[in-house]
Image (cartoon, coloured by chain):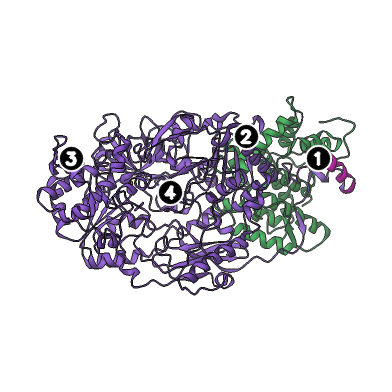
Chain colours: A green, B purple
Amino acid sequence: MDTDPHVAAVPTPLEATFVCRWAASLLLVPPCTDALATYATPEGKTLLAALRADPALAQTGEALSALTEAPDGLEIAASRLAAEHSRAFLVGGPQAVPPYASVWRSEKGLLWQEPARQMARLLRETGLVIDTGTPEPPDHLAIQLNLLAALLEREAEGGETPLPAAEFAHEHVMSWAPDLATALRRRGYTVFYGGLIEGLIGFLRHNLANQTEHQPGLAGREPALTGKPATTNATI
Amino acid sequence: MTRQNQLTISRRSLLQSATAMGALAAFAPTVLRPGAAQAGTNGEVISGSHWGVFYGQVEDGVWTDLRPWENDPAPSHQLPGIMDSVYSPSRIKYPMVRKAWLEGGPGASPETRGSDDFVRVSWEEALDLVAGELQRVSETYGPGGIFAGSYGWKSSGKFHNCQSLLRRMLNTALDGQFVNATGDYSTGASQVIMPHVTGTLEVYEQQTVWPVLIESTDVLVFWAADPITTNQIGWTVADHDVYPYFEQFRDTGKRVIIIDPIRNKTAEFFDVEPIRIRPQSDVAMMLGIAHALYSEGLHDQAFLDEYTTGFDRFLPYLTGESDGVPKTPEWASEICQVPAETIVELAQLFAANRTMLASGWSIQRQQHGEQSHWMLVTLASMLGQIGLPGGGFGLSYHYANGGAPSARAMAVPGISDGGAAVEGAAWITEAGAYSIPVSRIVEMLENPGTTFDNNGEELPFPDVYMAYWAGGNPFHHHQDRNRMRKAWQKLETFVVQDFQWTATARHADIVLPATTSYERNDIENVGDYSSKALVAMKKIVEPQFEARSEYDIFADIADRLGGRDAFTEGRDEMGWLRHLYESGMDQAESIGLDVPGFDGFWSAGILEFEISDAARRFVRHASFREDPLFEPLGTPSGLIEIYSRTIERMGYDGCPPHPTWLPPDEWSGESAEYPLHVNSAHPFSRLHSQLNGTILRDDYAVTGREPCLIHPDDASARGIEDGDVVRVFNHRGQTLAGAVITDATRPGVLRLNEGAWFNPVDTTADTALCAYGDVNSLTGDVPTSRLANGNSGHTCLADVEKYTGELPPVTVFEAPTNA
């Protein structure tokens, strides 16, 4: 563990809303050199420490730490991340792993199928729109994670949501994200993104498991990861 | 937006955010904000495509379904595939730059093209890079440094014509300092030889129309043509008007003869067993028929005397007087492996009946391809029926519904590329500082600074260092893929603009995402030959990701080169559509055609034109036949030239001055090592490589790979069974395919349709194995001759074996559910 005295206070355990948005931002755009440098700030070190402390995200935290402390410099690390991100999510073809639910959950395997349209409806019902600077279909995993975070916040504030956050996670995210993770692993995305999605799934599974204990309708749909003792307090 | 997308976090923004939002919030920004989503469009939108006019059904801004236009008499089964291409996961989403190029600059590690990583950049950076490269290469290497002869089946549309727009940008903003290309891959040989023979291209001109064929033709010959397959698509927007005529002709019970090594879809339609000619021997068979006509006195000497020149110079060759080899049916039979008696019967049948010789183009896409159509015209001349209703020859019955009667239509021009227009096909212009025959691009890259012969001229191969491709896929349509990949390494910069990650895009240095034609507005004719309507190609859905229209992309590049105003002329998309339409209104008025104003047309969506009775009686070359003195052909003599003194003066070994049988260097039965001919005809369920990556593939793929037709004799000799994965190979390359054992193909002939996506297993290998079935991994890259320098894709031998190694997956189409 990092013992840097300058590490800021960590919101331990990691909040799911934070993890969802943090992972989403990395999925949309790989961190550039400047962004990687922020992990060397006290706040960044705090985040890395929190990631390493989380059973599901520890490997991701280690990978990110290694990248930000790479002996050949942040520029090389950013370049490696960008290359992996492009190969997996941006460049179509042999190495592509499209991060869209429609591709995985529709008969045709195309963009903008029913999962995307469901997401569009949910966003509308939640009163949210996607920033114009993010021209992605609404079933991009990053958009889904952002909506999940928003639903969690609303629930925490006692606000109304079109469906419970946990149900959304089960139905719309966990229904295909594990397949995405498997594909990333099989296609050798080991620099960062394969581990990120696996860690994210583990994190969500654990938190969902805690949540579904209190929601009989959802219990048992998504088994919690075994062999990983819960050390965080779920916020969902 | 810069390369550092707004989502990335700088230290400064972190500190600012940290103060306001808490220590870590800046690491987790949201991309959602409160707001009411704009209501998505709903309803039907009319548009057009190479596959026809259709209505796209839109629900909440999403394209969910389509239906063909009610006046399309035979909608193509391929049409639904276009939706798949719009929503393909292989869309190019953002501007991308090859990593090595971005880091090392132009020319960095060209050997890694096709396997290197890409890095996302902002549009601003991408456009700066492209404009900077155009400037640098132009200044460093001069007017021959940039190749912009971008070729391919770009999307339909008179305005968003990416190839015209590319050249327009270079003409207006770079003073035309680029290398252009002439001709095309379809008719490279014929469109050069035919002007010497009949004075026009022939291959893109209206044919004697189908109502006349139905009434007057007794014998309809499809020689190397499969119009049932190929008329599904059109260069503009397909009308499919010929299909009902096909049915009517079939209903007459008149004779249809098909000469093809393979029982194609047209043979199936007419329920005719084809004459299984040996591939590439067509000229020999035609000579055999010609000899039979002459020896039996069945030729029309009067026609030859009045309408042709040079038969007397050709005759000694036909009889063998000049070379000691009479081109008898028996001689021909030895070569083409069609029985001599069949050849004689055909001669007698043709002479005794009104006969239309309708040829496809494949027989001119082979070494010495110039000879095929020249000999066909000679044969038709000997029959003496050219210019008579239902007789003669036709070179476009299989293309874009040639022979469909032409409407009295409004002629809306397309946007100009700024070069001098040339009569003929829409894509043939004289823009640019240099020009090469389009399929000689690899030869150009391999031999910079040298000269080559071309149609009587000695031309230079310019020293090209940059290529810019828009709306084409040379890593599909060019021959000899492995040689091409190596030659491509000469380029310091390769820019590709497309909507999908084609093999070409994956071999680029800078990739720009373009919209599909369904994400922008345009206008196009319906029917290349009929022009029966003008359709408003309305935008169906908003541009996906960061895709931009070709026009906007080139306008911004022109802006960086100081030429925006000249490029745009101050118009935006709708301004141009209005301008083009109103230009057409002037023409319409001149012919007394009453058409609505632009707004009325756009609102209606489609404007149909009447087809006159006279148009339904059109007979090609009738006016020439009626009065050859006052309606001469465009040849030096004004007559059909069976002997060309112009060609004689060129002195090319590969193209003598009269039709001649010249065996190709590579053909079936002449090689022990690679005994099988590879037929690379057009596919039934895609347009070249377009729509290969769609759901249509489910109907024809075999074990997920391109089907390869193999005759049972060839299969059993090699222990191959139906459904096996096979390796087709020769000294140039190798590809996997799925075996289809069928007697539809002639023994000794494999069929592997062109257009299959190149899926190299190892992108660094000299002879990369294609996992899916790209036939151009096998084909050779030799010119037809120095007359036309057309491509010779049908000159190809190979062998096939059952593949027993570990099967590499097909990954080029993205199949994540199998990952």
Q: Earlier in the sequence, mark 3 or mark 1?
A: 1
Question: What residue did someone put label 2 on?
Answer: B139
Query: What amino acid does circle 3 point to?
Result: Tyr
- Quick check: do tags 4 and 2 share a chain? yes
Quadrant containing the C terminus of chain B in the rendered view: top right
Please state the chain letter of the residue tagged with numbered disc 1 in the rendered image.
Answer: B
The picture places residue A119, in percent across and down from the top left corner, at: 66, 58
Question: Range of the magenta residues?
Answer: B8-20
- Disc number for residue B317: 3
Q: CA distance from mark 1 to mark 2?
A: 38 Å
Q: Earlier in the sequence, mark 4 or mark 2?
A: 2
- Quick check: do tags 3 and 2 share a chain? yes
Q: How many marks?
A: 4
- Cβ–Cβ under 8 Å for marks 4 and 2: no
The picture places residue B419, in percent across and down from the top left corner, at: 52, 49
Please state the chain letter of the residue tagged with numbered disc 3 in the rendered image.
Answer: B
- Cβ–Cβ under 8 Å for marks 3 and 1: no
Look at discs 3 and 1 and give the one toward the viewer. Answer: 3
Q: Earlier in the sequence, mark 3 or mark 2?
A: 2
- Cβ–Cβ under 8 Å for marks 1 and 2: no
Q: CA distance from mark 4 to mark 2?
A: 37 Å
Q: Earlier in the sequence, mark 4 or mark 1?
A: 1
Query: What amino acid does circle 2 point to?
Result: Glu
**B454 left or right of B334 in image:** right
Label 1: which secondary element: loop
Q: Is residue B10 magenta?
A: yes
Question: What residue did someone put label 4 on?
Answer: B688
